[in-house]
Image (cartoon, helix red, strand yellow):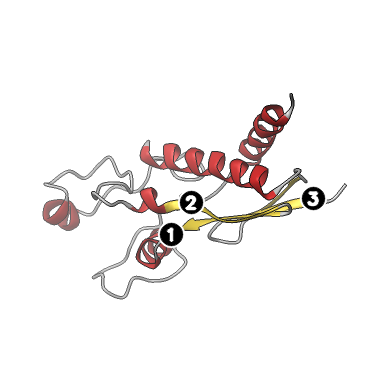
Amino acid sequence: MARAQITVTRNFKLAVPRLMSATAMRAVGLELCVKIENRTRSGRDETGHAFTQYSEEYARRVKGGRLAPVTLSHRPVGMLNELDVLVATPTRIGIGFRSAAMEQRAEYHDGLVRNPGVRGSNPLRRFMGVHPSWVEAAVRKIRASLMF
């Protein structure tokens, strides 16, 4: 049986059983987006650890002095609101950000590029990882919804 690929921003790939359509794969991708968003909003990185707290300077300037919790979703038009399935085919799901600005912000947090506009350094806050059990659960859920 052919295997499909799920690709997130860092080209993270997991093999999943091939689904029937691009629509079904998009549904799997949306399930994964919700998982990423929920985990990130809870202040946890892709390994389940709490995000590194804000620097004192940043917290004073932007967060009203609060060093934690870090959820990567503090702005009215936050980065996580832009997370979406960008590509869905019968063999591939691409999860990323609808806007270039949010994609760039995610790359800074995820350590893919250095933020040239920031003094000091951005701590890594990796959040785009997808656990294999999430993929398996999403595939089961979508397959079950397709069964009559």
Provide residue 137's location: percent of width, then percent of height.
65, 32
Give the residue type that dot 1 points to.
Arg
Provide residue 37's location: percent of width, then percent of height.
43, 42
Disc 1 designates what residue?
A: 98
> Viewed as shown, does residue 13 lie left or right of 96?
right
Q: Is residue 38 above or below residue 104?
A: above
Q: Is residue 31 above or below residue 80?
A: above
Disc 2 designates what residue?
A: 84
Give 91 or 137, whichever is nearer the viewer: 91
Element type at mark 1: loop
Provide residue 78's location: percent of width, then percent of height.
31, 51
Label 3 vs label 1, nearer the camera? 1
Tell me the distance, in whole angstroms, between the alpha carbons under discs 3 and 1. 26 Å
| Sequence-wise first label, 3 or 2 | 3
| Sequence-wise first label, 3 or 1 | 3
Tell me the distance, in whole angstroms, between the alpha carbons under discs 1 and 2. 7 Å
Provide residue 132's location: percent of width, then percent of height.
66, 41
Disc 3 designates what residue?
A: 3
Q: Quadrant of residue 136?
A: top right
Residue visible at 48% across and 51% down? 84
